[in-house]
Amino acid sequence: MSALGRLQRRLAEPPPGPFRPDFWRSPLRGPWLTSLLGTLLAPAIVLIALTGLISHDAYHPELRGNATIDPAHDIGVLLQFPTSGPSWIYALTQGIHVTVGLITIPLLLAKLWSVIPKLFQWPAVRSVANAIERLSLLLLVGGALFEFATGVLNIQYDYAWHFNFVTAHYWGAWVFFAAFAVHVCVKMPVVVRCYRERGVLKPLRDDLLHTRPEPAEPGGLAPTAPAAPTLSRRGLLGLVGGASLTILVLNIGESVGGPLRRLALLAPRGRVFGTGPNDFQINRTVASAEITRELIAADWRLSVRAGTRTVSLSRKQLMALPQSTHELTIGCVEGWSTTQHWTGVRLSDLADLVGAPPGATVAVESVQPAGLYRSATLSSEQASDERSLLALCVNGVDLSPDHGYPARIIAPGVPGVHCTKWVGSMRFEAA
Amino acid sequence: MIGHFKRRYGANPLHLIAHLIGFAIAAYAIVQLLDQRRWVNWLAWFLAAALLHDLVLLPAYSILDRVGHALSRRLHVRLPGGGPHDPAQVPLVNHIRAPALISGLLLLIYFPLILGPGGPAYFSATGHHPSGYLRNWLLITLALFAVSAVIYAARVRRARVRATRSGRRSSPA
């Protein structure tokens, strides 16, 4: 036999270990199980993607200075974030994004566990179609794990990377979602066939004694040499559900507050720091924003401008203007939120004061010397909403320096970091 | 024509079309990322995410599962009669597996707060140090194992009662 022939024979034989089909012994693995896990996972992924895009839109990247993703290169998606909704609308959509993201992790890991033999298929490439599909699976699995890992680390302030999180998480999501959509299309017939053959939920009726492996097919997911089961299929699903439920209970309190906050034992923002009027979650302290005492001292002035007209106001003068109080929510992109009673001057009153044109947008800038999100532009709907305030007080007392003293923006449905703190200037501009 | 394509390509033409559309969108997004500074770091994270899961995390928890399984077979309470697959036997394995898996998952998700690498950034955002997370995780782990143990004890008791009853019935008077 020629050397080439021997080599060919060698390559046809899978190397020992995970490349051999009898290496994978779990009696639960099989196309039906993977189909069910995929069917449960897909709607969660869609929900996470949609709420992610909604958040992207809620930042109003079309307004000057707001975009992190260059709008000229962005993939336009027609998702209109409701602007006149309840004040907690952004807290809701972003709470869903983060919470559903977290509770989907057990399901994602179970799904990946169920298909691991495919990674070690032999021969490594069966056809052109197989090669193309495997490339798309690299984007799918890499994309999924990248998105989940960066999201999970970001909400815990563990910036272990050097890239810009927003850009990487946003474009990474497009890579993931493109591969995901293809995967759903390509695998749909397999899922339908499995459900036809075995029923959608019927295998879940089997207890441990009646748990039998799915029939093995060459190159398939079902094991050729199954071990005795130690867990039923419904037991596996229960385990995944139990894990998701545990994460839900331990995290949801940072988003909904109330008594659930006591259960948010692992949530990054689950804790209660005190009972005072300013004892609610802070995002970026006065120290980390490098706001010195001089910047917010008694000689602080707010400059409000529209066109060529500029008015300069001291805190005393602002307090003398008509005050409104609203119950408004800070919703953070990290998924936590907090609702407080804010008192201050309506943005629309400030617009009138300088004779801004109707429907003007407002660019708000902090006295913060440098850093991300030191300024943001609010849309005309946000600026003209009668609940949108330049807040001076919270829960009946002056804002604390960490919450933006002397004055901060608070407006319904605006992502937390766009509720600029330590405001120094506001410029109204025709939309 | 389509038959010829299928033989050469290995799947339906729609398979190719779907992938080409998907690749086009993904490629566009990747180009946007490659435009950023630090794209090498992004690429490393993307590939490491897949490799670490498939070649480290999954094998690691599979081995731990085996260890746990072997351990549970030693510890599990043997009831009179029947081998380990007798329905009267209550296997311990899932009563270790479930709390261990959930606790491990919590550690996997919340390790930056539990073990503290995100500490300085957490402090500058919130004004507080991320303390208490390790204690909370340990307490939750303890609670999970305790609940699981109580359920196991209840199941063994029930099986014992059942075994005694059927034993009485089958023994000659």
Image (spheres, rainbow, N blue to C red):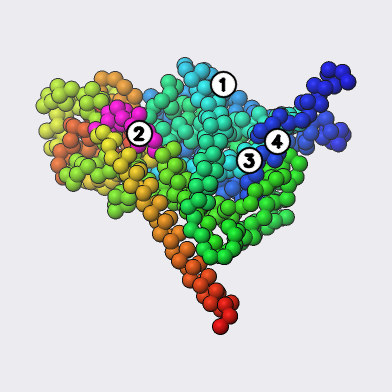
Disc 4 to disc 1, how far (Cα)? Answer: 37 Å
Q: In front here: A301 or A124?
A: A124
* Residue at numbered disc 4: A20
Q: Chain of mark 2?
A: B
* Residue at numbered disc 1: B31
* Residue at numbered disc 3: A115
Q: Nearer the viewer, mark 1 or mark 3?
A: 3
Q: Within 10 Å of the Cα at label 3, are there few (<14), some (14-19), or many (20+) other Cα atoms? A: some
Can you say which quadrant of the picture contains the N terminus of chain B? top right
Disc 2 to disc 3, how far (Cα)? Answer: 31 Å
Q: Within 10 Å of the Cα at label 4, are there few (<14), some (14-19), or many (20+) other Cα atoms? A: some
Disc 1 to disc 2, how far (Cα)? Answer: 36 Å
Of marks 1 and 2, which one's residue comes earlier in the chain? 1
Answer whether residue B116 is magenta in the image: yes
Q: Residue furthest front?
A: B173
Please state which amino acid type lies under the numbered disc 1: Val
Q: Which quadrant of the view contains residue A307?
A: top left
Please state which amino acid type lies under the numbered disc 3: Val
Give the residues drawn in magenta, as a range.
B110-127
Q: Position of residue B114 (x, y in %)?
A: 35, 37
Q: Secondary structure at mark 3?
A: helix
Magenta stretch, main secondary structure, is: helix
